[in-house]
Image (cartoon, grey):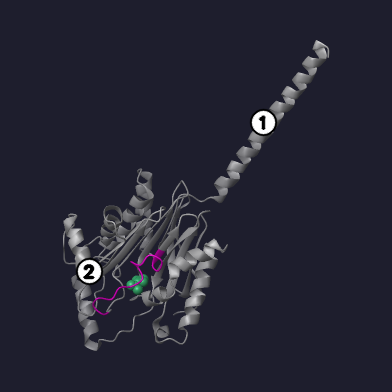
Amino acid sequence: MSDRRKFIKTAAFGTMGLATVYACQQKKEEKKDVVKKELNKPLIISTWKHGLPAAEKAWETLNNGGGGIDAVEAGVMISEADPNERSVGYGGLPDREGKVTLDACIMNSNSDCGSVSFLQGIKHPISVARKVMEETPHVMLSGKGALNFALSKGFKEENLLTEKSKKDWEKWLEKSKYKPVINIENHDTIGMLLLDENGDLFGACTTSGAAWKLHGRVGDSPIIGAGLFLDNEVGAAAATGLGEAVIRTAGSAMVVEQMRLGKSPAEACKEIVERIYKKHRNHKDMEYLQVGFIAVNKNGEYGGYSLRSGFDFAVHDNKGSRMENAGFKMEWN
Ligand code: ASP
């Protein structure tokens, strides 16, 4: 081949090569854009209206350089400290003996988790749950043992029964009837799920549980797999509502399993609510049964579903924060 022909051939290949590289690069850019559009990260969702300030706090924590676990902890602490939030932490409605008893759990993307149940006198059970996760060989501490552990870690014991909650309890004692009022007395637990910038999942759940419960009753909220569950390969879910029904059906774990099988978060929540309904429609609890789930998957899709209307959840993502109504099976007025 003459030098001139060789030059033309090489130049042609060189140009083609460059064109191919350019085209590939462009494709990659486009793909990146598509991926960016598809993946809504970071993303925080959180049960009920008090989930809104909580999610804002979690978002702020991420923005200030905190990790996912710092964010969910700081987020739900807002509800725990709020005396007007009658189902979580300080100001929560007591059991039938007038004692505020708390359940909480926390979980990270490595499936590490920590939990406290039937804890009294500690304003931030979620922080004790985190210590159980990070500083003990266990997952769950309960009652006096959980309290002693908290005190050993520097938490202060304080009275969590506000005057308002005390008055409500005294009023309840007049009739002493356990029949939780749907959407008011038996569920306002805060469950928070977070998908961070890296696509890792975190969750936290904290509650004072069902009002007027028997002393010693533990609900679903501190139980990994019931009140909260995540699998970093799939997604995360949290529950609110009548804890007994959620425990009977391993609610949050089942929602995650439905997502593993290919359902969207909203479909997965619906599937398990339907299952709970089927198992309870002739049950004595049906009269006051409400359950709701929220869920998020690895693609940044999220959703919620409840048995009865009235359940909403907070969403915080790059578009800002807002409340969204969950789908539901039946009307409640
Ligand atoms: N699930 C909680 C419980 O049964 C109640 C709630 O959601 O507020 O303890």
Q: Which residue is mark 1?
A: 22
- Badge 1 density bin: few <14, some 14–19, many ≥20, Cα 10 Å: few
Q: Which quadrant of the rendered structure holds the N terminus? A: top right
Residue furthest front as drawn: 137
Residue designated by label 2: 143
- Residue 143 x, y percent position in the rendering: 22, 69
Farthest residue toward the top?
3
**Nearer the camera: disc 2 or disc 1:** 2
- In the picture, measured across the screen, residue 221 lies left or right of residue 149, that is right
How many numbered discs sit on the rendered protein? 2
Q: Is residue 102 left or right of residue 36?
A: left
Circle 2 sits in a helix, a strand or a loop, which is it?
A: helix
Residue 6 belongs to the span the image colors magenta: no
Picture quadrant where residue 48 is located: bottom left
Q: Is residue 221 magenta?
A: yes
In three-dimensional space, the C-alpha distance between marks 2 and 1, rounded to whole angstroms, equals 64 Å
Residue 90 higher or lower than 111, as above or below: below
Residue at 34% x, 75% y: name it.
186
Q: Position of residue 320 (x, y in %)?
A: 45, 52
Residue at 45 percent of width and 65 percent of height? 294
Label of residue 104 in the image = none
| x then y, percent, for residue 250 | 43, 71
Element on which disc 1 rests:
helix
Q: Which segment did they paint magenta?
A: 214-228
Q: Is residue 119 above or below residue 196?
A: below
Find ligand 1 in the image and state its quadrant.
bottom left
On the image, the x and y values in percent for residue 73 come to 32, 55
Image quadrant holding the C terminus, namely: bottom left
Of residues 320 and 157, the one nearer the viewer is: 157
